[in-house]
Image (tube, grey):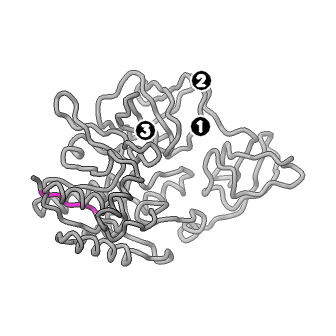
Amino acid sequence: MAKVFVGLSGGVDSSVSAHMLKAQGHEVVGVFIKTWQPDFLVCNWEQERLDAMRVAASLEIPFLTCDAEEAYKTAVGEYMIAEYLKGNTPNPDVMCNRHVKFGVFWEFAKARGADFIATGHYAQVLKDDNGVPQLARGNDANKDQSYFLWQLTSDDLAHTMFPVGHLPKPQVREYALAHNVPVAEKKDSQGICFLGHVDIEEFLSHYTTLVPGAVLNESGEKIGTHNGALIYTYGQRHGFTIDAATTHEQPHYVIAKDIEANTITVGTAAPRIEEGEGILLTNISWVNTPQEKMLAQFRYRQEPFEVTLHGNTLTTPTQTERPARGQSVVFYTKDNECLGGAIVA
């Protein structure tokens, strides 16, 4: 059996993960990862840590705290702010996983003799015919979190466990209730990794001045107002005002934005990629060998679509929604293996 450090967040998924690993005979250590939170957000990390401690106590396992505040502030908080200021749409959860949960936490655990780290992610680590670890979707399609793990490598996966990844969420709840896990009925956390729900407009207002500006139609005519071009992303259909005489009760989608002019352009159809159109990518990272034809998705829970990758240019044979700069695109096989991902340039 192995020595496994489990990232205990205070939630049910990581708590059940720790319980299952101990039941399997592993030497389990519970670890709460403390991260940065800006002063203006409601701070609940102390309650989360208390819940994690309660779980560790109930399991009679050691409990430690990993200080990842500086790494989180730099790799997640400052990254997110910088991307929005450039007009991009960042994915902070991807960076949190790469630099904090599978970066700082692993180094913390390894320095203390751990063989593995484990988290409550709904994803799976499988091995190919050569014994090389692969990343696969979680079995619960509604909870699968492999989309946020595309920057991991086979080396990361070699010392990583996802104990609940093969289970549907209701079964995890049932397990927690059946085994008297202290947080069995606690609600799932929502929003950004460790920060929870964040109002982007309110968040960015602490780091820059958001200036109201014009909403334009596809002809360049002003038809409304917005609260600052930085806070909008492609396909967004709320958070701006359209003149009543213009709406005709039709939804309007953001199809372009000009950060320098502080304008957003809207249309009555969501922005789309045309068949065969190329999308430039950057920061391409592979978990496993890419294939000539793959499935991909630009956002969490999006229906995957077929793509071809030539160098750093993605094309698709079908029309699909247009991503914003800064978004992640994640690649899969038809067998639900996550091959890797990239960022839209």
Q: Does residue 32 appear to the left or right of 47 in the view shown?
A: left
Determine the secondary structure under disc 1.
loop
* Residue that carries the numbered disc 1 in the rendered image: 322
The answer to which of 58 and 263 lies nearer the viewer is 58
User: Is 213 placed above or below 146 here?
Assistant: below
Magenta stretch contains residue 265: no
Highlighted range, magenta: 3-7
The reply to whether callout 2 and callout 3 are in contact (CB within 8 Å) is no
Q: Earlier in the sequence, mark 1 or mark 3?
A: 1
* Residue that carries the numbered disc 2 in the rendered image: 275
Task: Give coordinates of residue 333: x percent, y percent.
Answer: 38, 29
* Residue that carries the numbered disc 3 in the rendered image: 330
Q: Earlier in the sequence, mark 1 or mark 2?
A: 2
- Label 1 and label 2: CA atoms lie apart by 11 Å
> How many other residues sit within 10 Å of disc 1, few (<14), some (14-19) or many (≥20)?
some
Task: Give coordinates of residue 209: x percent, y percent.
Answer: 61, 67
